[in-house]
Amino acid sequence: MPGNLHVRNLDDDLIVRLKRRAQRHGRSTEAEHREILRQVLANEDETSFDKLAADLRKLTKKRKQTPSEELLREGREER
């Protein structure tokens, strides 16, 4: 089942422009809103987990790293 999205507090000028654009394309304002979202999000690249992990490794490369085994061991010993 499709979800619903309610957009509040839009500028009046934006609403007028959306309505005009919808009219030019022969769609309802709601259909135009859906199409704009679809187009924008279709062109957006989602960053893969591997890319995010590589970026994080670059950011933390110079920091002292503690192996996870040590952290787990310390956690067990504290119990």
Image: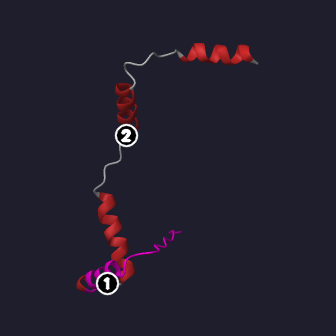
Of residues 43 and 65, the one nearer the viewer is 65
Query: On screen, 44 above or below 57?
Result: below
**Which amino acid, by three-letter code, is at mark 1?**
Val
Q: Which mark is residue 70?
A: none
> Is 21 within the magenta?
yes
In the rendered image, the residue lying farthest to the right is 79
Density class for disc 1 (Cα within 10 Å; few <14, some 14-19, many ≥20) is few
Q: Which residues are magenta?
A: 1-23
Picture residue at 42% right of the left edge, 19% below the top: 63
Picture residue at 40% right of the left edge, 75% below the top: 10
Of badges 2 and 1, nearer the viewer stands 1
Colour convention: secondary structure
Residue tagged 2: 48
Residue tagged 1: 16
Residue 9 percent coordinates (x, y): 45, 75
Q: Which element is circle 1 on?
A: helix
Q: Is residue 45 left or right of residue 67?
A: left
Cα separation, mark 2 vs mark 1, equals 38 Å
Query: On screen, 59 above or below 19?
Result: above
State which quarter of the image contains the C terminus.
top right
Q: Quadrant of residue 54?
A: top left
Picture residue at 35% right of the left edge, 35% below the top: 51
Picture residue at 31% right of the left edge, 84% below the top: 16
**Which amino acid, by three-letter code, is at mark 2?**
Ser
Q: Quadrant of residue 15?
A: bottom left
Label 1 near label 2: C-beta < 8 Å? no
Tell me how many marks there are. Answer: 2
Residue 69 percent coordinates (x, y): 58, 14
Residue 14 percent coordinates (x, y): 32, 77
